[in-house]
């Protein structure tokens, strides 16, 4: 084996591959020196589809298959086929299903279906639609429907953070704070809402905005990246949050997932929930 | 134990809980008769935080802890503490990390950090921003930047499907098809792009639109839900897709994750990728 190990990772599911992708990526993050080629095989619904996957694998390389396959027959077929070709095949969920089953003395359902169109699913779709419609200060007339309101200056990741939260089921409004323009909401009317401010290191924000202008081929907007104005914008947002006792999150070193997780903690605290949201 | 088993599920991570939530939800989908109360504990960063979690658990109930904890000390502390309280504690990633490590004879990194701000991460943020800016036929002047273009009539889940794809790293434009208005794009100019049409059962679409009008307190828009018009709209989209050889997906019985997975398959096929997207 050379300096750097290379791994071909074959992710297989008869559903969407969402879980297996999430787990595989989290696992390989523990091996920074590893070079990983990822092959995603979703909606695998037949033995011939399994055959196609197996025959696409270059057996001279390092290969691992990871899978979540609900259909019993198909799962057994995949395992047998992989074994015949001498390829390691790792289940993602089996040990957890076994633990739940043993602990509660309940058998797993013979015909489970993932992502069925449940109430929880439709709530999530509604949250995504609501959040898109209320991106960047749009449609503030029905701000009452929001679970979470995010306030911040331009380029503090308000939109992706909102979308991430929407995907977790929260209806989010995000409102840009623009220099010398009053925030277009009545903070007194939002007393029972979670409003969160996003703040960021000034130099980092100038760098992000400069890149943004370059990518838009618009480098004449000097105010947008002037230190004085950026500093004023940020300190104004900080002041407004302080005055209204809205929590403020510094996103400088945070990924959107981390910012969103922090916001969910504030949300749970405000709504007296322990840990997180209950679901059935 | 009564008729229906009840399980309190405590999901713990020193990161965002994304992986552990995804796995836990996929696993409990195998037990439809189970009633699950989910408690999400993200960004757990200290032993006192672990103490708070453990002390919040009602030991008279059925409890399972599932976790992804990167920090070695903290993980050991959680395991010991749970054991002392006699609560089953299930790791999500350990067996996979072990398999990778054994198979390739590489040790896992001592200080792994999840969701670090990598190129892949910034590409994803860019994809989300692009997709929001191009929702519902906006900003078509830079449609060239898109990876995927989705066309469909109103209420065929174009927006949430686009957002889901964006979250997986694809830049998506979605364009509504409106009755008797020409599609505002030049299909010849899109020859090298993946354009996908969404179609749906007529009765189902009328039902979705009727609910939409009720929720908007606007029940006077008869055309929007008239059988004739809905039928015309859908057959027009089908015709356009057929003419341009754009694949058409029937979303009637599909979740957005399933629709997105199908679109990714078309994308890979168009770009001659095996399985899915490679990443390092």
Image (cartoon, coloured by chain):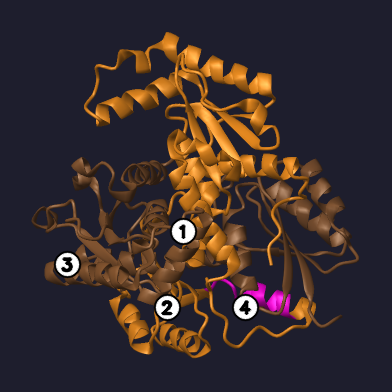
Chain colours: A brown, B orange
Q: Residue at x 70, y 37 (%)?
A: B192
Q: Residue at x 25, y 30 (%)?
A: B216
Contact, CB < 8 Å: mark 2 with mark 3?
no
Choose between A248 and A88: the one closer to the eye.
A248
Residue B131 place in picture, x, y as percent? 49, 46
Tell me if residue B34 comes above or below residue B143 in the rendering. below
Marks 3 and 4 share the same chain: yes
Q: Which residue in the protein does label 3 denote?
A: A240
Closest to the camera, between mark 2 and mark 1, is 1
Closest to the camera, between mark 2 and mark 3, is 3
Q: Residue at x 36, y 57 (%)?
A: B2
Q: Secondary structure at mark 1?
A: loop
Is disc 3 surrounded by few (<14), some (14 to 19) or many (20+) residues within 10 Å? some
Mark nearer the N terminus (1 vs 3):
1
Distance (Cα) linking label 1 and label 3? 30 Å
Q: Which residue in the protein does label 4 denote?
A: A30
Contact, CB < 8 Å: mark 1 with mark 4?
no
Marks 2 and 1 share the same chain: no
Name of the residue lying farthest toward the front: A220
Q: Is residue B97 magenta?
A: yes
Q: Is residue A268 magenta?
A: no
Mark nearer the N terminus (3 vs 4):
4
Distance (Cα) linking label 4 and label 2? 27 Å
Question: Considering the image in quadrants, where does the N terminus of chain A appear?
Answer: bottom right
Residue B101 place in picture, x, y as percent? 72, 80
Q: Which residue in the protein does label 2 denote?
A: B87
Q: Which residue in the protein does label 1 denote?
A: A219
Q: Which residues are magenta?
A: B91-101
Predominant SS along the magenta part:
helix
């Amino acid at each position: 084996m050379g300096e750097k190990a290379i791994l071909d990772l074959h992710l297989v599911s008869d559903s969407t591959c969402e879980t297996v992708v999430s787990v595989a990526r989290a696992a390989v993050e523990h091996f920074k020196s590893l070079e990983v080629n990822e092959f995603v095989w979703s909606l695998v619904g037949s033995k011939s589809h399994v055959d196609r996957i197996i025959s696409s694998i270059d057996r001279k390389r390092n290969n691992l298959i990871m899978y979540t396959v609900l259909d019993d027959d198909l799962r057994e077929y995949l395992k047998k086929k992989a074994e015949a070709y001498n390829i390691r095949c790792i289940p993602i969920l089996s040990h957890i299903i076994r633990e739940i089953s043993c602990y509660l003395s309940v058998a797993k359902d013979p015909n489970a279906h993932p992502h069925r169109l449940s109430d929880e699913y439709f709530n999530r779709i509604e949250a995504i639609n609501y959040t898109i419609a209320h991106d960047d200060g749009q449609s503030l007339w029905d701000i009452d429907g929001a679970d979470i309101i995010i306030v911040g200056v331009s380029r503090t990741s308000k939109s992706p953070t909102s979308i991430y939260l929407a995907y977790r089921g929260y209806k989010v409004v995000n409102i840009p704070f623009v220099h010398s323009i009053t925030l277009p909401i009545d903070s007194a009317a939002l007393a029972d809402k979670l409003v969160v401010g996003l703040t960021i290191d000034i130099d980092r924000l100038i760098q992000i905005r400069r890149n943004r202008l370059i990518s838009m081929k618009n480098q004449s907007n000097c105010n947008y990246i002037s230190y004085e104005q950026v500093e004023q914008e940020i300190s104004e947002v900080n002041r407004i949050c302080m005055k209204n006792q809205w929590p403020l999150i510094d996103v400088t070193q945070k990924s959107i997932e981390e910012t969103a997780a922090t916001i969910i903690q504030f949300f749970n605290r405000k709504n007296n929930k322990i840990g997180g949201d209950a679901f059935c």
